[in-house]
Image (cartoon, rainbow, N blue to C red):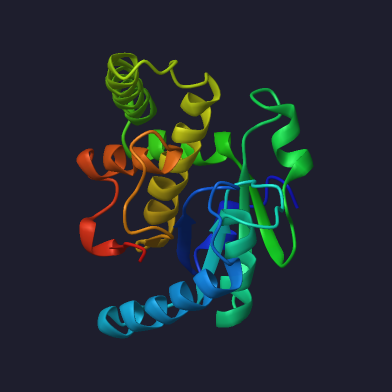
Amino acid sequence: MPGDSLNSLSPYHPVVIEGAGGRDTRDPGEVAGKIADRLVTHWAGRSISRPPLLITQGDPLEPRGISAITPRVAQRLNVLRGLVCLDEAIAPYHARDADRSGVVVEFRYSQFEAVLEAVRPGAVGALQVAVDEAIESKNNRRHAQGMPPLRDYFRDFAMLQEVTKAACRQLCGEITVAHTDAAVHEFSVTSFYTVGLALGWIEREEMMMGY
C-alpha cells in the first residue's frame, strides 16, 4: 500500500481535518459528531461531485485529540480514509506508528512534493521559504514572551501539512479542510494553514473552521 498510485485519489473529494493532538482535552466523540454534522452542511452548500475520502497525516492513535477525532468522523460519515506519511529518510517512526484503521490508500510526502513541482516548478522551495519565515516570526514572538523556540520537527510537519493539502487539491480539483478548533493556537502546526492560503494553494471557501 505505501506508495500507491496517485491516480487512486482522483475518484474522491479529499477531506483534511486539522487540529491539536493530546492537549485537546475535549471528548473526541462529541467533537467528531459536531465536525461531521458541519461537514454535511458545508457540502450541501457546495454540491461536491465525488465521495469524500478523509486524508490523515500519520498521527499515531491516541485517546484524545486529532488522531482520536478523525476515525470517529470517518465512522460517522461512513467514508474511507487515506494516509500520507513523511518518508522514512525524514522521520523513520512516522509511517511505522501511523494509525491505518480504515485506510485504503497510502502515500509518501515525496510523492506529493512531486505533484506540486510538476504543476509549478520551484513550488516546494517557495513553500519551504514561506514556512521558514513563519517559523522565524513565531520564534520571535515566543522569545519576546520568554518561551523557547519551536522544536525542529515543526518544519517537517508544517511542510507535510501544507504539501498534502495542496497536492490533494491539484490531483482532485477540489478539497475540504476542516479545523477542530474555532481558535487555532498561534504556535501549533495547524497555524501554518495561513501559508497555504497566502500562496493560493487553498481557497478560504474550501475551509471549515471548528467550534
Choose between 38 and 8: the one closer to the eye.
38
The percent coordinates of residue 32 (x first, y second) are: 53, 71
State the residue at coordinates (23%, 55%). 203
Decide if residue 53 is on the left or right side of residue 121. right
Choose between 2 and 159: the one closer to the eye.
159
**In this rendering, is residue 68 above or below 190?**
below
The mark total stands at: 0
Residue lying furthest front: 146
Decide if residue 203 is on the left or right side of residue 98. left
Decide if residue 64 is on the left or right side of residue 48. right
Choose between 140 and 99: the one closer to the eye.
140
Q: Quadrant of the C terminus?
A: bottom left
Residue lying furthest right: 96
State the residue at coordinates (35%, 26%). 131
User: Quarter-wise, where is residue 103 in the image?
Assistant: bottom right
**In this rendering, is residue 5 above or below 85?**
below
The percent coordinates of residue 61 (x first, y second) are: 72, 53
The percent coordinates of residue 106 (x first, y second) are: 67, 52
State the residue at coordinates (39%, 58%). 181
Choose between 150 and 23: the one closer to the eye.
23
State the residue at coordinates (56%, 52%). 6
**In this rendering, is residue 204 above or below 140?**
below
The percent coordinates of residue 91 (x first, y second) are: 67, 27
